[in-house]
Structures are given as structure tokens and as C-alpha cells.
């Protein structure tokens, strides 16, 4: 073993150990915010930390402070996060200790991840998929910054053994093995969850589990031995840089400190003496002695680490806390599309159905941007989407750019975090809104919070297409409306267009927006086959057309009237067509607003209209109880109370658990032109 590597490794272990001991000695000062430490895990973490390069991407988990030290992160920087200080380089005081995000030129890149109990495996695998895509497309590699001869990058996902039982881990392993992605899963196995141990919770360890994923090579090592860990990882990393395939390293380690500062080991542990017998610290100290280091040299390394840690702690205690106004930064990255641009209705252009407007928008984007790719269930060449919304794209752009995924909604959604992090723009699709639920964990925890919790370093630039709504007896598993759930996820933008021109314009704006965007596309409007929805067809906008988010459309505008009862209808998607059809014969009394986007929401246009008309009806396809529409109604009532001549009302589907298959029952449940008209007359007569 190279003596310089041994020395660096021991210094790193000393620093990590000193951090733990300082935190314990100052427990009351540092335990205001929960933290965990690497004590017992330092050897394997250091062995990895010293070998990754700036072009690599890493997803450490919450116990990996020794790994971060190995990357070159300073104790002072870790302490700024420990104490939730304003200058915390990872999150500006927003997230927990050892929840890093880094974009430093001289260190491995660390995109956002949550508390990392398995969820980080999908974004990390998305990074590796992005690396592979860049190589397959022969794109300028943004990861290498154009440096010729630089070793190819890898992605590393660090996991605790307990998290490997999560279902999302299986999705990540499956894709890594299937696609042969350059990712290393490092599993640190200390035998514990929190108070539950491995015997209670795991049928096999991670090494044994990996055997079920053909193409994912696994090894098991003593992670408490620095020399063994370093040599094993050195061999694995070299192979991965050359052969571009996945590995799992299962490292057995002891847990020598508390699960977290809030869950003390003495409350539940009965194996502390056995764990202490496997402490990696004296093992490496002896390896230094065996390599010829004197006691004086070893003591000097230890003393320097302790001095550094204590000095940094005193500085960190004095650092500035965030100010109240710091709360309101970096929820979104600035978007360049703030005004409607381009030709919406070019001369000579033909009317096309809504689904084709989206298809042509994506085709134009893919022609122009090789960073753009599309994946999801059944979008590949054989079918081109179950609604033909991706028809011909795989044939035109190849199977590497338009491809099928397994039935893995969590992976489809969460992988975009990693794809975006390496400079790509993924457009992904969940086949039906009813099937979005497995993807919500990733959408909420990883995608939506990335920009905010990294203090603006890692916004996730992605588009998630979601076919939605009831159409043609789709029954309980193909008809749901889910916008109220989606709108309760902060940190994403949401479109719900009612026609093809808006869909194309919003798709273009979404592509150039650096933030995550969900586009809800009503299946019943795709081809305008539902009676009364011809208005969803449009003259196809020009290629340069883009429609900014947060700009509602007043489809049917009226003047303020003193001698007539007037009304504003606010809706989106299919509701717009019910509203327009229902107001025939009374269009001088009813103003219709198409929201177009649910977030950001054009409140100014809505409130201005309601203040003019004095009455309001919000129309939605969702069951109205506890819905987005009901919340909007409440907001309108609050803002416009002094101008109202009646209560703000909401019309939605019946409040039943699911949409039945039978067409009579389906039509009984959802709104219609007739139901909207009846409600309009009720509100006008109030």
C-alpha cells in the first residue's frame, strides 16, 4: 500500500473521528438539529472519497461525512450545515447535516438527494444513464468539460444496508443491470435499521440480493479495513471506467455511534462491545506503524486533526444564521420564457388535433437539441405511445433517444434528476394519471425540492407528460383526475391546456424552463372525438411559438354591466369546453377564463374578472371536495368578497371513490355541458 495513501487515509479517519467526539462533547450545543456521523464507517468511506475524480457524480447518504472529507470538503463547511448557518455551502441552512449538494469544479459533483433511505438510488442511476446517453450520442461531454484524455466518469450511490429493502432500489438495480450503466452502489452494512436489526428485516444481505440482477456484479468486503477497502474499490473503479458497467460493493462495517443524535444507541443496542472490537481506527493506525510510520508521526497526524476540528467549530459557532428573507430564494430557477413569442396561427397552416401539436413540438425540439430525449412505457418504436403521442419519433431519432422503460413510474420520474444533472433535458411520460402514484415519492422528495434545498445549484430541468381525465369508458384505472395532489407539491410547474396551440406553446416553454414541469394532457381532447370539443383542434403554431406559464386566457370576454347579472367561469382542460358550450346564447353575460397553467396561477386575471362580473363558478373534472378547484374558489371568495353578488361556487365530478366503467355511471359522475349550464343559471339567479 502506498505510504502517502495510508497517511491521507489515516488523516481523514482522524478528522472524522474528531468530529464525532467533538459533537458528543458538545451535545447540547449541536443537537438542536439532528445529525448522524460516520463513526465505524470511516474506512470504506475514506477509501472511496480519496479515489473519485471531479468528473464523477456521487450520492452520499446521511452518515457519509468521512466520504465528504475525502472529497476535500472541510470540517468547517460540514459544521456550517450541522448548525444550519447561512453560509452552509450545501443548502444555506435548509437541510440536515451530511445532506450535501456540491457543484465545485475540483470535487465530485453531488446533486440533491433527500434523507437518502433508498430514494437516492434512482436519481443516481439517472446520472449513469445520462453518462451513457452522452457517450452513445457522441455529444460534447459536459461532465469532462472538454478535457481530452480525462478518465471516463462514473456515478456512485452510497446506501445503508437497511435501505436496500426499499422497492425503489429494485427499480434502480434493474435499470442499471438492463442498460449496463456505469454506476457503483456502495452498501455500508452495519446490521441495523434504527432499532430493528438485519435478522428482523432482511431475508438476505445486499451482496446476496444483487445476485438476482443479472449484469450487476457484486463483491463483499470488510469495510472496516482501509487497505482492503481501498484496493477493492480501486479495482472496481478502474474496471468501471474502462468497461462501463455496474457494480455493487457490499461493505461490512460496525456502527460505533448513535443512529442519529436523536436516537441514542444505548436505548436499544445489545452489540456495542462486539461492534467496538471492529473499530477501523486502530486497524489503520497499526497499518501505518507496519508501513514504517513512527509513533511521533502518527501522533502528529492525530493532533493536527483534533486541532483543526476544534478550531473550525469555534469559527462555525460564530457564523451568521440565515435571515427571514432567505426563506424566499431559489424555489425556482429563473426561466427565459416570460412573454408569448412566435406565431400562434401562421398563415396557410392547417388545423391539427391536440395530440399532434404535442407530437410536432417534441419532434421540433429533438431536431434542434440532441440533449432532448423521450422515454416512458410503450413510447418506443413498436407503438409510439398508447395514444400515438410519440408516433414515429423512435424511427426518426433512434432507439437511444426514444425508448421504452419497464413499468417503473418511480424510475421514470426520479431518473430525470440525474439526467438533468449531467446536462440533458428528459421528457418522460407516465402512461395514465392513475399510475402516477408510485412516482409521487420521487416527484415530491427528489424532483420538486432539488433547486430549493441545494440553494439554487441543482434545479431539475425535466418535463413529465401525464395523460389524464375520463374519456370513453376508461373505467376506474384509466380515468382519474389527479391535479389536486400534484398542485400540492411545491417546486414544480403545472400545465393543463385545453387546446393544441396552448399545448405546443407550453411544451416549448417547458423545454426552455430550467425547472421541473408536469403537463397534464386530457385524453378526451387529444383527437376531439368527444362531442363539443372541436375547439381543442388548432392551427398548428410555428416552431418558434412559446407560451409562458402563469398567463391565463380570457376566452370569452364581456364588458362590465350594471343592469344584468354577470358571471366569470374559471376552468382548465376539458372544463373549458363544457363552459364554452354551456354559455351559448348568454355569451354577453358570462366571461370564461382558461387557466392554462395551474402553477404558476394567473390570479391577477381571475380576480380582475370576478371583481368585474360579481359572480364566479369554478369548473373542474375532479370531485370537488378538498380539490384544487375548491381551494381556488376559497381564494377568490377571500380576495373578491367586497365585489361579490353571490357565493363563489364550484362544480366538479360526484364525490365517489372512482369513475365506474359503465358509460351511464361514468356520465352520471363527471360534469357535462348540461350540468355546467344548469349551474350557471343557478349562480346567475342568486
Image (cartoon, grey):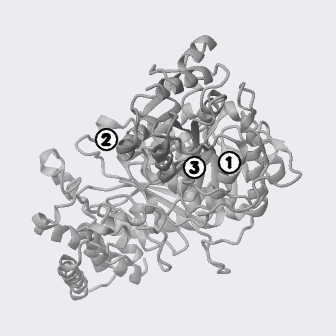
How far is disc 3 from disc 2 in space, using C-alphas? 54 Å
Q: Nearer the viewer, mark 1 or mark 2?
A: 1
Judge whether 234 appears above or below 397 on screen. below
Q: Please give the name of the residue rendered at 70% of the width and 64% of the height, measured from the top-left corner.
A: 135
Query: Which residue is at the far right?
Result: 348
Q: Quadrant of the C terminus?
A: top left
Q: Please give the name of the residue rendered at 23% of the width and 77% of the height, measured from the top-left corner.
A: 320
Q: Secondary structure at mark 3?
A: loop
| Label 3 sits on residue | 552
Q: In the rendered structure, find residue 366 and report the number of the disc placed on it.
A: none
Q: Is residue 209 visible?
A: no
Q: Position of residue 75 (x, y in %)?
A: 28, 76
Q: Is residue 654 left or right of residue 341?
A: left
Q: Crowding near pointer 1: few (<14 within 10 Å), some, many (20+)?
A: many
How far is disc 1 from disc 2 in space, using C-alphas? 53 Å
Query: Which residue is at the far front?
Result: 563
Q: Crowding near pointer 2: few (<14 within 10 Å), some, many (20+)?
A: some
Front residue (pair 333, 591): 591
Q: Is residue 331 left or right of residue 671?
A: left
Q: Crowding near pointer 3: few (<14 within 10 Å), some, many (20+)?
A: many
Quadrant of the image occupied by residue 450: bottom left
| Label 2 sits on residue | 198
Q: Earlier in the sequence, mark 3 or mark 2?
A: 2
Front residue (pair 451, 284): 451
Q: In the rendered structure, find residue 502 and report the number of the disc placed on it.
A: 1
Q: Secondary structure at mark 1?
A: helix
Quadrant of the image occupied by residue 344: bottom right
Q: Please give the name of the residue rendered at 58% of the width and 35% of the height, measured from the top-left corner.
A: 589
Q: Is residue 105 visible?
A: yes
Q: Please give the name of the residue rendered at 69% of the width and 50% of the height, measured from the top-left corner.
A: 374
Quadrant of the image occupied by residue 468: top right
Q: Earlier in the sequence, mark 3 or mark 1?
A: 1
Amino acid at each position: 500500500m502506498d505510504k502517502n495513501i495510508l497517511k491521507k487515509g489515516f488523516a481523514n479517519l482522524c478528522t472524522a473521528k474528531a468530529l464525532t467526539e467533538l459533537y458528543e462533547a458538545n451535545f447540547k450545543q449541536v443537537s438542536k438539529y439532528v445529525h448522524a456521523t460516520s463513526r465505524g464507517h470511516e474506512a470504506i468511506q475514506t477509501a472511496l472519497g480519496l479515489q473519485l475524480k471531479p468528473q464523477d457524480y456521487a450520492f452520499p447518504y446521511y452518515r457519509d461525512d468521512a466520504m465528504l472529507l475525502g472529497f476535500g470538503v472541510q470540517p468547517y463547511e460540514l459544521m456550517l450545515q450541522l448548525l444550519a448557518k447561512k453560509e452552509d455551502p450545501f443548502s444555506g441552512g435548509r437541510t440536515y447535516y451530511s445532506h450535501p449538494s456540491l457543484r465545485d469544479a475540483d470535487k465530485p459533483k453531488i446533486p440533491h438527494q433527500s434523507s437518502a433511505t433508498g430514494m437516492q438510488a434512482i436519481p443516481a442511476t439517472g446520472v449513469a444513464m445520462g453518462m451513457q446517453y452522452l457517450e452513445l450520442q457522441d455529444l460534447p461531454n459536459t461532465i469532462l468539460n472538454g478535457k481530452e484524455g480525462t478518465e471516463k466518469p462514473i456515478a456512485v450511490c452510497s446506501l445503508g444496508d437497511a435501505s436496500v429493502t426499499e422497492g425503489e432500489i429494485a427499480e434502480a438495480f434493474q435499470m442499471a443491470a438492463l442498460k449496463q450503466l456505469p454506476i457503483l452502489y456502495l452498501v455500508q452494512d452495519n446490521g441495523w435499521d434504527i432499532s430493528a436489526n438485519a435478522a428482523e428485516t432482511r431475508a438476505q444481505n445486499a451482496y446476496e440480493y444483487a445476485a438476482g440482477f443479472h449484469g450487476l456484479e457484486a463483491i463483499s468486503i470488510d469495510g472496516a479495513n482501509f487497505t482492503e477497502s481501498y484496493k477493492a474499490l480501486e479495482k472496481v473503479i478502474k474496471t468501471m471506467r474502462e468497461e462501463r458497467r455496474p457494480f455493487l460493493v457490499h461493505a461490512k462495517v460496525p456502527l460505533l455511534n448513535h443512529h442519529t443524535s436523536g436516537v441514542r444507541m444505548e436505548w436499544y443496542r445489545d452489540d456495542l462491545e462486539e461492534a467496538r472490537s471492529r473499530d477501523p481506527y486502530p486497524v489503520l493506525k497499526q497499518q501505518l506503524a507496519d508501513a514504517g510510520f513512527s509513533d511521533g508521526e502518527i501522533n502528529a497526524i492525530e493532533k493536527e486533526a483534533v486541532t483543526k476540528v476544534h478550531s473550525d467549530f469555534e469559527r462555525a459557532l460564530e457564523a451568521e444564521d440565515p435571515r427571514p428573507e432567505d426563506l424566499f430564494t431559489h424555489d425556482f430557477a429563473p426561466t427565459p420564457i416570460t412573454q408569448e413569442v412566435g406565431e400562434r396561427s401562421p398563415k396557410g397552416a392547417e388545423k391539427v388535433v391536440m395530440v399532434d401539436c404535442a407530437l410536432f413540438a417534441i419532434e421540433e425540439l429533438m431536431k434542434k437539441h440532441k440533449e432532448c430525449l423521450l422515454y416512458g412505457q410503450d413510447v418506443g418504436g413498436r407503438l409510439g405511445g398508447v395514444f400515438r403521442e410519440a408516433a414515429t419519433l423512435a424511427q426518426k431519432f433512434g432507439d437511444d433517444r426514444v425508448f421504452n422503460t419497464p413499468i417503473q413510474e418511480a424510475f421514470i420520474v426520479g431518473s430525470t434528476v440525474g439526467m438533468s444533472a449531467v446536462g440533458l433535458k428528459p421528457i418522460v411520460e407516465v402512461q395514465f394519471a392513475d399510475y402516477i402514484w408510485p412516482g409521487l415519492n420521487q416527484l415530491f422528495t427528489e424532483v420538486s425540492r432539488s433547486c430549493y434545498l441545494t440553494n439554487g445549484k441543482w434545479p431539475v430541468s425535466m418535463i413529465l407528460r401525464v395523460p389524464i381525465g375520463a374519456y370513453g369508458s376508461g373505467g376506474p384505472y384509466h380515468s382519474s383526475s389527479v391535479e389536486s395532489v400534484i398542485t400540492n407539491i411545491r417546486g414544480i410547474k403545472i400545465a393543463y391546456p385545453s387546446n393544441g396551440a396552448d399545448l405546443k406553446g407550453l411544451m416549448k416553454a417547458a423545454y426552455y424552463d430550467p425547472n421541473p414541469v408536469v403537463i397534464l394532457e386530457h385524453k378526451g381532447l387529444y383527437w376531439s372525438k368527444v362531442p363539443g370539443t372541436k375547439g381543442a383542434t388548432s392551427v398548428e403554431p410555428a416552431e418558434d411559438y412559446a407560451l409562458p406559464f402563469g398567463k391565463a386566457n380570457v376566452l370569452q370576454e364581456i364588458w362590465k354591466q350594471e343592469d344584468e347579472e354577470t358571471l366569470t367561469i374559471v376552468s382548465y382542460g376539458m372544463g373549458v369546453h363544457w363552459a364554452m358550450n354551456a354559455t351559448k346564447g348568454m355569451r354577453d353575460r358570462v366571461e370564461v377564463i382558461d387557466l392554462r397553467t395551474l402553477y404558476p396561477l394567473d390570479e391577477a386575471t381571475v380576480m380582475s374578472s370576478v371583481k368585474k362580473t360579481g359572480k364566479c363558478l369554478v369548473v373542474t373534472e375532479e370531485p370537488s371536495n378538498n380539490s384544487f378547484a375548491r381551494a381556488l374558489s376559497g381564494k377568490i371568495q377571500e380576495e373578491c368578497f367586497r365585489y361579490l353578488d353571490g357565493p363563489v361556487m364550484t362544480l366538479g365530478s360526484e364525490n365517489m371513490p372512482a369513475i365506474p366503467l359503465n358509460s351511464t355511471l361514468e356520465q352520471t359522475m363527471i360534469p357535462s355541458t348540461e350540468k355546467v349550464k344548469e349551474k350557471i343559471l343557478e349562480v346567475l339567479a342568486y
